């Protein structure tokens, strides 16, 4: 039976679109790998908006290389001045209302998910990757990637990747109930052939010296803090003692990561001995603080509040035996 011409053309168009969609879509892991390469290797300026808890925060992020040194600058555009600058392995935090300081770090902490800047490693055991549809985002065609955790003890992500460049154009943080917790939306993306005059100026500018790691006291050498529980897949990736600029005191510090997200643990002495816990949330970011017997334990990261609290409540000290004194 012959089909009418218009119906034949329409059917053929549908078939061609279906074939293109099936054969043209990249695997989600490949798209995520392209995203990491774009963020780390390209020279660009991104304007974006972060939406959390009914609050909107406009930001500007610039990245490039000057004389082989990787330089990034994140600027918060509303309210008092807040800037984060990375030069190589040094990250400087500059705020108008606080003393500026610098840290030795391979990556700055900001609204862009850490894994998008450092890479996705060993997360397949704890997350599922599923391709969604394509849509127009920030004026560009984007592919949706659903990153769903296997357990409800962490958030999921909906990520829209630019088909042409690989850049992330939008990222939604989703709770286990499917609610939107936080959103990062790119407004404009400008790719550059060479670093801007602004990045070149940063390369030659002086920033605060890095915060020195203090020598361990005898008491701190004898006490080692351990975390009794973390969600599956989280591993200890950093541990030290350093002076925290915000409180101007030495803290025990640990960082854990599952390859996609990370959380930090801070432990310090306080004068308050009353046992209590407190929780502060801002979008996907949770900060749970627990005070017990003059010790404050703080867990901070993009985690559900109940997960941050459970982690804090399982942290305990281990007392090491003092080393015997050497005989004269």
Image (cartoon, rainbow, N blue to C red):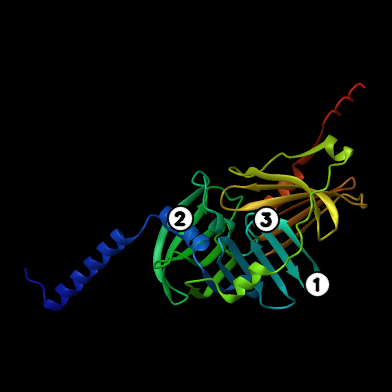
Q: Position of residue 44 (x, y in %)?
A: 52, 70
Of the numbered discs 1 and 2, the one sitting upstream in the chain is 2
Residue at mark 2 to residue at mark 3: CA–CA distance: 24 Å
Task: Reply above or below: 5 against 249.
Answer: below
Disc ID at residue 33: 2
Q: Is the residue marked by circle 2 packed among few (<14), some (14-19), or many (20+) residues within 10 Å?
A: some
The residue at 83%/48% (across/down) is 214
Total of numbered circles in the picture? 3
Disc ID at residue 267: none
Q: Position of residue 82 (x, y in %)?
A: 71, 72
Q: Quadrant of the N terminus?
A: bottom left
The residue at 38%/54% (across/down) is 27
Residue at mark 3 to residue at mark 1: CA–CA distance: 23 Å
Of the numbered discs 2 and 3, the one sitting upstream in the chain is 2
Quarter of image, res 88? bottom right
Relative to 214, 9 lies left or right: left
Q: What secondary structure is marked by label 2?
A: helix
Residue indicated by mark 3: 301
The residue at 59%/70% (across/down) is 61
Q: What secondary structure is marked by label 1?
A: loop
Residue indicated by mark 1: 97
């Amino acid at each position: 039976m012959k089909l009418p011409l218009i119906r034949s053309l329409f059917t053929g168009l549908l078939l061609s679109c279906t074939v293109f969609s099936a054969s043209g879509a990249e695997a989600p892991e490949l798209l995520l790998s392209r995203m990491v390469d774009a963020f780390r290797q390209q020279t660009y300026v991104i304007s974006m908006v972060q939406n959390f808890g009914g609050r909107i925060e406009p930001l500007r992020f610039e990245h490039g290389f000057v004389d082989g040194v990787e330089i990034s600058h994140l600027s918060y555009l509303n309210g008092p001045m807040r800037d984060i600058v990375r030069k190589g392995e040094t990250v400087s935090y500059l705020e108008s209302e606080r003393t500026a300081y610098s840290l030795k770090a391979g990556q700055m902490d900001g609204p862009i998910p850490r894994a998008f800047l450092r890479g996705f490693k060993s997360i397949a055991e704890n997350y599922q990757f599923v391709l969604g549809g394509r849509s127009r985002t920030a004026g560009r065609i984007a592919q949706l990637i659903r990153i769903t955790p296997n357990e409800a003890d962490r958030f999921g992500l909906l990520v829209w990747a630019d088909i042409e460049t690989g850049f992330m154009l939008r990222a939604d943080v989703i709770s286990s109930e499917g609610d939107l917790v936080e959103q990062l939306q790119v407004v404009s993306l400008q790719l550059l052939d060479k670093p801007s005059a602004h990045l070149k100026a940063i390369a030659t500018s002086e920033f605060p010296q890095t915060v020195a790691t203090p020598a361990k006291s005898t008491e701190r050498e004898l006490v080692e803090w351990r975390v009794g529980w973390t969600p599956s897949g989280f591993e200890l990736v950093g541990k030290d003692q350093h002076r925290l600029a915000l409180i101007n005191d030495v803290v025990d510090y640990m960082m854990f990561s599952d390859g996609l997200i990370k959380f930090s643990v801070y432990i310090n002495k306080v004068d308050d001995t009353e046992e209590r816990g407190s929780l502060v949330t801002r979008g996907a970011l949770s900060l749970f603080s627990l005070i017990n017997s003059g010790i404050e334990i703080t867990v901070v990261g993009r985690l559900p509040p109940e997960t941050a609290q459970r982690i804090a409540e399982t942290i305990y000290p281990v007392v090491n035996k003092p080393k015997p004194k050497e005989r004269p």
